Image: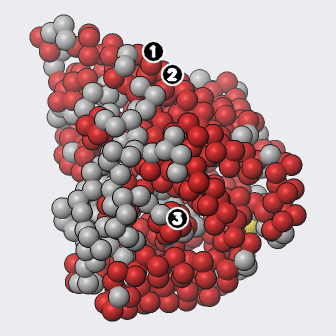
Amino acid sequence: MKHKKISRHAVNKTPSRLETIDEEREVSFGDSAKSELYAKLPLLEICTYVGWSMFAWFCVISSLYQSSQKHASALHSSSLLLRGWQLLGDTRQDGADVEWRFWKMTINSQFLLMVLVYVLIMRVVEILIPLKRELAWTILSVSFLTIFYEWQLPAMLVVHTFVSFLASRSRSTRIVWIVSTLQLCSLYVEGANSIITAYFGFPHLEHAKFFTAICIIKLVSFSLECCDEENLPVSPSSENTQDTLFDALSYALYLPFVFAGPCTTYDLFRTQMNKPVEPLNKEMLWGFLSEFIRYTLALLAVEFFLHFLYVPALAHRKDILREESFPTLSAVIVLSLVFFQMKYLILYGFPRAIALLDGFSAPLPPVCVLGLYSFKDMWKYFDRGLHRFLVRYIFIPLGGSRQGVLMNIMSAAVTFLFVFFWHGPQSFVFVWAILNWFGIMLEVLAGKLGRTLYAKDMDAWLSGATYRRLMGLVLVLPNTFIVAANLVYLHGEETLKIQIKNMLFSGHPSQILWIFVSVYCNLQMNLEARRIWGKRYLCTKGYYFRSNPKEKEA
């Protein structure tokens, strides 16, 4: 097999536009004068922000703990609590999050044994027959899926892969999108579900639909990459200039990413797959162990705190939330976001760690949501693989940010329409997508306005520290809007209405002041962290141990 350097080509055949991915020209609201935004503040002022934040955290967590213990019996009777660790005595653990509970049930001793078998076999294949590793992981993946989910799931994934491969042969992006849209419709249309159940007989159709949705988004990437005939790279499984059906299968069924992700676009997957196989060395092993230990500690921490802080369970009980105090509601809101980030840190992290042993660098896990204060950064640094997919295949081909404000708005609207449809056409998902699109568009417009205003010699009468304090005050409202938009996805519209009503309109006016001060202090702490370590270092997780110190973010 020839190892050729692969060009990073876009579907619209403008690779230079993709390299930036809106990093240079599109800045978030408030970033029009970055040096002033990250200006140094007095140490006493920073200590005040930290002190208030620690006090606020203590108040809300202690209130949440008391409420969790108070309603433990009611939550347990609603089957929202499960049996906890025996090490902690007769305790209950929050089991209300369906996704988290599903993955805990999946990862049993047999699952872990199969993962170990996969790792060992792949190491032997890389030593003895490195050119056959693509075939090896495809066979292992099909076998793995068959053992755990019987023959129906791999059969369904193979059928979708075959259909997408046929669409890719047309070399037409329109045909690819039509076929991919129909494939997604087959997951959500009731009549199509009946046909799938009749032919495949899925015992757990919802699980199959989840895995298939992950597979389809990868097949979209494969098919669209194949539409670029001029820059089509050499297939790793042969010396053809066209990707084969086997290439599509090996990409869609790559075992570490087949269950939960993260999403890795085909161009990056192919680029790494075409590299010569490197034997496992100390650097690679250390990179794997360091990340594996990090995710294991995160998993243990989440499991431990779910024994005492029943965040998902309380969010499920609207009747209890209506009666809860302001500190408890605040804790449920903030810790719901933290739990969401930690959940995907773990679900994306472990597959990434296993892929490192195969020589693949998957997109990094999400950064802490409390360290992000703009919609654009939330989307860019939370699910990095999905963000790259959306920008590469939808946003830029439709015009993106370089064709004027109107085209920017329309391109973003279509992008979030796909986000809504892929996540599942439900009302709360639609509201969540609309709010995020609206928030990003406000940031774009505010960023342009901010650059215009700052160009008028604002630095002549406004110091850097004053500018930072002023922008901190301005950013409180959009930061609060980000929290509300994400809570729609996590809790639904009704729960969010209860939280907003009780926190903003039914309580003492001092509650609004508490929220404002707490958000402002958190923003200033974020700006201080970025001033000291740099935004790029924090958002690209530069503090991670890497198997390759020069590794770039996928």
x then y, percent, for residue 151 = 72, 77
Q: Quick one: label 3 or label 2, which is nearer the N terminus?
A: 3
Residue at image x 75%, y 60%? 206
In this rendering, the answer to whether 192 lies above or below 452 is below
Q: Are marks 3 and 2 in contact (CB under 8 Å)?
A: no
Of badges 3 and 1, nearer the viewer stands 3
Residue located beneath label 3 in the image: 245
Q: Secondary structure at mark 1?
A: helix
In this rendering, the answer to whether 502 lies above or below 303 is above
Q: Quick one: label 3 or label 1, which is nearer the N terminus?
A: 3
x then y, percent, for residue 243 = 44, 60
Q: Are marks 2 and 1 in contact (CB under 8 Å)?
A: yes
CA–CA distance between discs 3 and 2?
34 Å
Q: Secondary structure at mark 2?
A: helix
Query: What mark, if any, has residue 406 been given in the picture?
Result: 1
Query: What mark, if any, has residue 410 been given in the picture?
Result: 2
